[in-house]
Every structure is written in C-alpha cells, then in structure tokens.
Amino acid sequence: MRSSPRSGRRRLPALALLAAAVLALPQAAAAAPATAQADTLGAQAALSGRYFGAAVAAGRLGDSTYAGIVDREFSSVTAENEMKWDTLEPSRGSFNFGPGDRIADRALARGQKVRGHTLVWHSQLPGWVNSTRDANTLRTVMNNHITTVMNHYRGKIHSWDVVNEAFADGGSGGLRGSVFRDVLGDGFLEEAFRTARQADPSAKLCYNDYNIENWTDAKTQGVYRMVRDFKARGVPIDCVGLQSHFGTGGPPASFQTTISSFAALGVDVQLTELDIEGASQAAYSSAVRACMNVARCTGITVWGVRDSDSWRTGQNPLLFDNGGNKKPAYHSVMSVLGGA
Ligand code: G2I
C-alpha cells in the first residue's frame, strides 16, 4: 500500500527512532571501540568497577601540568612518601600530618579515593624506631603508630598497606631482617594487622611487596603461605598489593596465575606501584590485562605521573612523557581497561 506524503511524514520520526535504536544497540553491546567508552583512566577503569590511581608527591602539586593530569585521569591517589613513618612520626609521639593531609584532602575534595602507604616498613623509618631494642617498647611504639595514623585518617582511606616489604629477596621465602622482625619476631606482622583492624575497621588491610609477581618465586610463595595462614586463623587481612615494578619485558608469564591464586585465598589483589622500564605497549597491556582477567583484582596504581616524576630516573616507565603528553602505552591501557 502506498502511503500519502502526509502519512509518510508522520511515520518518519518513528522510523528515525527505530533506526537510531538499531544503530545504537550493537554499538553499546559490542561494536564500539573500547577506547571510546570513557576518556580518562579512572573513568575507563570504573566501567569494570575498578579504580585507576597514581602515586602523588605533595611537592609537585603546585605544578599545573602535573596537577592537571592527576585531577583529570586518576580515581585514586597514593602519597608517594608523605604517609611514611619518617614523615608522619619523626620523633616519638610527635606526629606531622601536614603533607599527607594535603594529598588526601585534595583528592577527597575531588571525589578521588586514597590509598594509605604505609604503616610498618623497615625503610624510611626514623632512627629512633630503628634503635629501639626493647620488645615491649617497640611493640607499644608500633601499635601506637598504627593506631594514631589510622585514627587520623579514619574513613578517608580505602586500603592501607599495613606492612610493606617484610619478606626477604632470594630463595628463603622467609621474612627479611628488620628492627620489627629482629626485636619482636615474625609475629609482628600478625600484631600489626590485628591492631590495624581495630583502628579503622572501614579500611581494607593490605600486605604490600615487590618481586612477588612471579608465581614460583620463593618470595611469592612465602607471602602466599602467610596470607593462607592468616585467613585460616582469622587474622584480619583483606588484600595483597603486588607493587609491579617491571623491567622492559613487563610482567612474568605467570602474573595472572599469581593474581588469581592470591584472590582464591579470599583477598583482593591490587597492583599498587606499577611502572615498566621503557613502557612498551605490549608490557603495559599484559600487566593490565592480567588484572582485568581476575574479578578480585580491584585496582591499579601507577607509581608516578610523568616520566620525569618517576623514581626510576632515565627509564621512562610511566604513561605520560615529560611534557605531560599521553604515551602510546596510555592508549594500550585504555584499550585493555575497556575490555579489548
Ligand atoms: O622505591 C620505589 C618504591 C618501592 N616500594 C615502596 C615505595 O614507597 C617506594 O617508593 C619510593 C619513592 O618513589 C621515592 O620517592 O620510595 C623511595 C624511598 O625508599 C623514595 O625516595 C626518596 C628518596 O630516597 C629520598 O632521598 C627523598 O628525600 O624520596 C624522598 C622524598 O623525595
């Protein structure tokens, strides 16, 4: 049946709507390029319920290029140095929250989340702690530090690195020597986590370390046994941070196995300090894909913003160049975060 021009005109909006719907459906469902879904790392990661963060240095926030990238791209921030013991409690009982607050308050005001790094660590530890040799005193000092810092930031920190880098490199699979381990024994770890849970029950409690990305390494296995033991005995632990400082080849082939094995113990996994020498697209893609492939890998933090901000001088390991421009690896990460 031929339609009059008039009825044809009337049908046009309906047809247009139908055509628009037909065009839109497959795009939303499958055909749209992943990179088109969102236009920042944080927004793209949020599409799968994850965060994408960066380590931030308080002293660089006055640099407008730096601050602009931090504010635009990231949904979580970690203080690169400002929440470490030497800054927070340089002398016993005397706390300096200024630089850490500057980072945390600025982030929270912009709707970003904050990771806490780090409560108990053998490095960047003031001399007065290192020279405490009486066990009762050191126990009191450690617990007071955890409690005071976590109380100060209570409700503001999504995850705390309660203990950082406590395991030894090499083949032992055991703890490294440190004032905590040497004076308090291996039980300092458990004590730190129990104290932390009491101080801020709303924060996820993480164990964080480097060189625990390759599944068969003795250090990885040592951390795995500790987490398994904690879960079996009801010692509070919620997450494992894989720092993920990689060489030019990126993560080891077993990286996803490591992530899923920790996750299977009933903890979240976070990539907490990701950077890759040379920042090849393949290496960044493979690191991010391993996280995306495991439901309980809940977020990724890169350890700095521009290459010139990195602790790895001259290795160009980050997602933005010295001028603040997106590097090729940035686009690879966006694509993998979008499921490509
Ligand atoms: O070393 C890389 C990271 C390994 N995992 C734990 C992280 O906390 C650690 O971060 C780095 C910071 O990126 C550096 O910025 O930790 C270093 C210290 O262990 C930080 O370097 C220190 C310098 O050694 C100090 O001389 C300097 O005063 O940064 C301080 C603040 O700029």
Image (cartoon, helix red, strand yellow):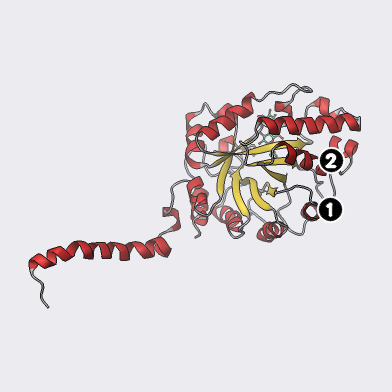
Q: Residue at x 68, y 46 (%)?
A: 243
Nearest the eye: 220 or 233:
233
Q: Residue furthest right?
A: 134
Name the residue beneath numbered marker 2.
Answer: 188
Q: Callout 2: few (<14), some (14-19), or many (20+) C-alpha neighbours within 10 Å?
A: some
Q: Position of residue 57 (x, y in %)?
A: 60, 31
Q: Position of residue 301 (x, y in %)?
A: 60, 44
The type of residue carrying mark 2 is Phe
Q: Is residue 124 visible?
A: no
Q: Nearer the viewer, mark 1 or mark 2?
A: 2
Nearest the eye: 180 or 170:
180
Name the residue beneath numbered marker 1.
Answer: 171
Is 90 left, or right, of 333 in this rendering?
right
Residue 146 image-quadrant placement: top right
Q: Disc 2 on helix, strand or loop?
A: helix
Q: Position of residue 175 (x, y in %)?
A: 84, 46
Nearest the eye: 157 or 183:
157
Some atom of ligand 1 lies within 8 Å of the CB belonging to the residue at label 2: no
Q: Disc 1 on helix, strand or loop?
A: loop
Q: CA distance from mark 1 to mark 2?
A: 22 Å
The type of residue carrying mark 1 is Gly
Residue 147 image-quadrant placement: top right
Is 92 left, or right, of 283 in this rendering?
right
Q: Is residue 304 visible?
A: yes
Q: Position of residue 14 (x, y in %)?
A: 22, 64
Q: Residue furthest bottom?
A: 1
Is 6 left, or right, of 67 in this rendering?
left
